[in-house]
């Protein structure tokens, strides 16, 4: 006699797969067979007394999912006292493998297409020590959704974001009203995989809920305390990704480990994210980016500028950027796109239209106005205060602590550019030497529509040389 056990995820088994999913009862010791109805208490008594009949199915007639509902205080700490919830009765059938061992696989007559793993040793809940009747430790439904618990019955609590908002996205108790949600609220959700809860606090449940349709979602272990409010498709997470609030349109993303404490609004799509994307607020489109490790504490979009600084329209976009490691503590305005950025983009205030730049390592503590575009910046661009329209420039290593007015365009600095001051319209200049502590405000040649070379004489005095259309001219840098 052979029994088909669905020990692989899938809706149906092909003929070629059937043999790998057969459990042959002839090899079991004992003379059992058939089906015997028992309560959970009777089953555990049979196990402890070594009185099972190998090969016999035991139908647990009073099985109910009993669980401590995860709940956290306003600081995100686990509450010491929580609600123990009990679901409706769902009969489960288990197979005795020997006189005191049952198979880890169970069968539900109510949901015959589900694949279920069952732990008979779970007899009290983890926080409140309430009596339990075993626990479903894995369930895969007929649509290919997998969780490490009974996702058909377990409900997770969410608190309203603000009083009267109607948005229930906080796993922390903020004092507002609460509602309960299944893991997959939308019945059209399919082919989703939620990893196990492994050494993550005291709760055995992951406490993650998808409040709208989700398809093709995959997570590693410890995907916990996440709230996905809108539709989500074909995104994959690594391990230890928790405490995130995610909006709609979270599609086609590949997320590394430790994606934590983020607030993601709508339109986060087609991104490849490295390890440790942490404590960011992304409040508008974030599309097609390749992000390295340690992207932390950034405010991108409305909250960074529209509400704090009072400018912008709120249609921020962070699109098609390739970013190295340690992108941290930045305030980003609208239209940050098509940039290739090295390691160490840190503590910058960037206004609107930062686009099409190639940025080296250590872009630090700059305040950048509107229209920083089409520039090539080498390493250590730091502490600069730059007004609008810094465009088509090539800056060598060490561009630091400069005060640069608007329309700094089409300049090439081949050496250090340090502690200088420029007025509006510094254009078409080539710095062929170190330029330090130079005030160009009173100069005239550096603001013309011809190329001006900035050079240094043997004793270190800066000069400007240019061709005005009549003759080559050399003047002091202040001229």
Image (cartoon, helix red, strand yellow):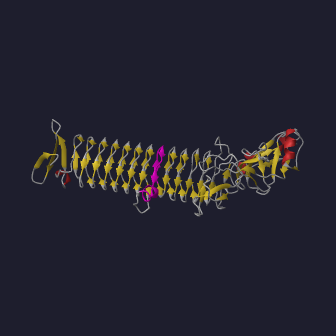
Image coordinates of residue 371 in percent, x first then y, are: 34, 56
The residue lying toward the viewer, choosing from 46 and 54, is 46
Image coordinates of residue 298 in percent, x first then y, are: 46, 50
Q: Is residue 411 left or right of residue 47?
A: left
The residue lying toward the viewer, choosing from 379 and 16, is 379
Q: Is residue 313 above or below residue 387?
A: below
Q: Residue at x 76, y 48 (%)?
A: 5
Q: Please give the range of residues in magenta.
A: 288-308
Residue placed furthest toward the top: 459
Q: How many marks?
A: 0
Residue placed furthest toward the front: 175
Q: Is residue 216 visible?
A: no
Q: Residue at x 37, y 57 (%)?
A: 353
Q: Is residue 263 left or right of residue 458?
A: right
Q: Is residue 301 magenta?
A: yes
Q: Is residue 106 magenta?
A: no
Q: Is residue 109 left or right of residue 34?
A: left
Q: Is residue 180 visible?
A: yes
The residue lying toward the viewer, choosing from 218 and 426, is 426
The residue lying toward the viewer, choosing from 338 and 409, is 409
Q: Is residue 351 above or below residue 454?
A: below
Image coordinates of residue 23 in percent, x first then y, are: 78, 45
Q: Image quadrant of residue 102?
A: top right
Image coordinates of residue 358 in percent, x first then y, are: 36, 48
């Amino acid at each position: 006699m052979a029994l088909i056990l669905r020990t692989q995820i899938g809706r149906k088994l092909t003929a070629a797969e059937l043999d790998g999913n057969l459990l042959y009862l002839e090899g079991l010791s004992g003379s059992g067979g058939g089906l015997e109805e028992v309560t959970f208490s009777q089953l555990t008594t049979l196990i402890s007394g070594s009185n099972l009949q190998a090969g016999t199915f035991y139908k647990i007639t009073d099985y109910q999912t009993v669980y401590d509902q995860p709940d956290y205080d306003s600081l995100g700490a686990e509450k010491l006292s929580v609600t123990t919830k009990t679901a409706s009765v769902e009969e489960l059938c288990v197979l005795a493998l020997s006189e005191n061992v049952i198979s880890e696989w169970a069968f539900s007559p109510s949901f015959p297409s589900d694949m279920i793993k069952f732990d008979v040793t779970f007899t009290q809940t983890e926080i409140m020590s309430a009596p339990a009747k075993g626990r479903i430790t894995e369930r895969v439904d007929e649509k290919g959704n997998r969780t490490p618990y009974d996702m058909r019955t377990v409900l997770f609590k969410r608190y309203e974001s603000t009083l009267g908002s109607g948005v229930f996205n906080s796993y922390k108790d903020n004092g507002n009203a609460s509602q309960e949600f299944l893991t997959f609220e939308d019945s059209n959700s399919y082919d989703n995989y939620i990893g196990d809860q492994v050494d993550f606090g005291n709760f055995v449940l992951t406490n993650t809920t998808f409040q709208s349709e989700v398809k093709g979602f995959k997570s590693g272990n410890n995907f916990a305390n996440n709230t996905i409010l809108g539709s989500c498709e074909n995104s994959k997470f690594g391990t230890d990704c928790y405490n995130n609030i995610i909006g709609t349109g979270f599609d086609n993303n590949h997320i590394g480990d430790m994606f934590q404490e983020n607030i993601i609004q709508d339109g986060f799509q087609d991104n490849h994210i490295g390890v440790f994307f942490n404590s960011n607020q992304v409040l508008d489109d974030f599309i097609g980016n390749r992000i390295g490790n340690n992207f932390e504490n950034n405010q991108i979009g409305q909250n960074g500028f529209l509400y704090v600084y009072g400018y912008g329209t709120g249609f921020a976009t962070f699109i098609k950027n390739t970013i190295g490691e340690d992108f941290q503590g930045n305030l980003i305005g609208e239209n940050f796109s098509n940039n290739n950025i090295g390691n160490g983009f840190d503590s910058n205030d960037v206004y609107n239209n930062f686009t099409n730049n190639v940025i080296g390592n250590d872009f630090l503590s700059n305040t950048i106005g509107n229209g920083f575009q089409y520039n090539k910046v080498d390493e250590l661009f730091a502490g600069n205060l730059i007004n609008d329209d810094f465009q088509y420039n090539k800056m060598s290593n060490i561009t630091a602590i400069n005060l640069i007015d608007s329309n700094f365009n089409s300049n090439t600095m081949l050496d250090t550019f340090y502690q200088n001051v420029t007025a509006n319209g510094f254009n078409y200049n080539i710095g062929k030497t170190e330029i330090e502590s130079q005030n160009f405000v009173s100069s005239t040649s550096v603001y013309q529509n011809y190329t001006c070379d900035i050079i240094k004489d043997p004793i270190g005095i800066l000069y400007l040389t240019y061709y005005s259309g009549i003759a080559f001219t050399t003047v002091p840098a202040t001229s």
